[in-house]
Image: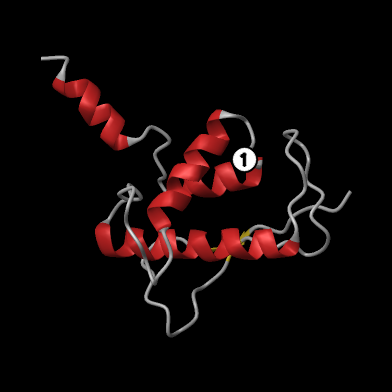
Amino acid sequence: MATKNIKNVQPAPDKQLSCCYYDIRAKGPSDDVSNGTAPQSNSQNRIWDENFELLMQFKTKNGHCNVPRRHAEQGKSLGDWVSKQRFKKSKAALEQRRVDLLEQAGFEWNNIYDTSWDAMFAL
C-alpha cells in the first residue's frame, strides 16, 4: 500500500499566503482506505487540492475558514465545497488525510450559521 506524502512546503513567490500550505498531492496511486473511504482518482484529488488552496486564500483574506454558503472564489463555488466537506465528514465519507488538513487549517466542522440560529433561541 502506498503512503501519502504530506509535508509543509513554501508557497511560490507569487503566492501571498500567510497561512500554512500543504502539498497534498499523492506520490502514486491513491489507495488510502484507512477510514473506509473509497480511493480518489487523480482528477478528484486535483479538484480537491484546488478547492483547498482556494480555502487557504479565503482564510488569508478573511482570517477564518467559515465560508458563506453562496460564496464564490475565482468563479468556483467555495461555499458549496465547504458544505460538502462538512456533510462528507458527518457521514464518515471524508478521507482522514483531508480531515487532518482541514483541521490544521482551522476549519470548523459545525456550520456557524446553524450555531448562530440555535443561539438565537437559547435566550
Q: 37 or 6, which lies in front?
A: 37
Question: Where does residue 46 sit, x and y in percent of width and height?
Answer: 64, 65
Quarter that holds the C terminus: top left
Residue displayed at 37% across by 76% down:
16
Residue displayed at 34% across by 48% down:
69
Crowding near the residue tagged with mark 1, few <14, some 14–19, many ≥20 C-alpha atoms within 10 Å: some
Query: In this figure, what is the number of numbered marks?
Result: 1
In the image: residue 106, left or right of residue 94: left
Q: Residue furthest top?
A: 122
In the image: residue 76, left or right of residue 89: left
Residue displayed at 44% across by 43% down:
83
Query: Is any part of residue 105 visible from this angle?
Result: no
Q: Residue furthest left?
A: 123
| Image: 47 above or below 13 | above
In the image: residue 64, left or right of residue 80: left
Q: Residue furthest bottom?
A: 14
- Disc 1 marks which residue? 94
Question: Where does residue 37 sit, x and y in percent of width and height?
Answer: 73, 38
Q: How is the image coloured?
A: secondary structure
Question: Where does residue 52 sit, x and y in percent of width and height?
Answer: 50, 59
| Image: 62 above or below 96 | below
Question: Where does residue 104 sit, x and y in percent of width and height?
Answer: 48, 47
Query: Is any part of residue 41 visible from this angle?
Result: yes
Q: Residue furthest right?
A: 1
Secondary-structure class at tag 1: loop
Q: 111 or 69, which lies in front?
A: 69
| Image: 40 above or below 13 | above
* Amino acid on which disc 1 is placed: Leu
In the image: residue 78, left or right of residue 46: left
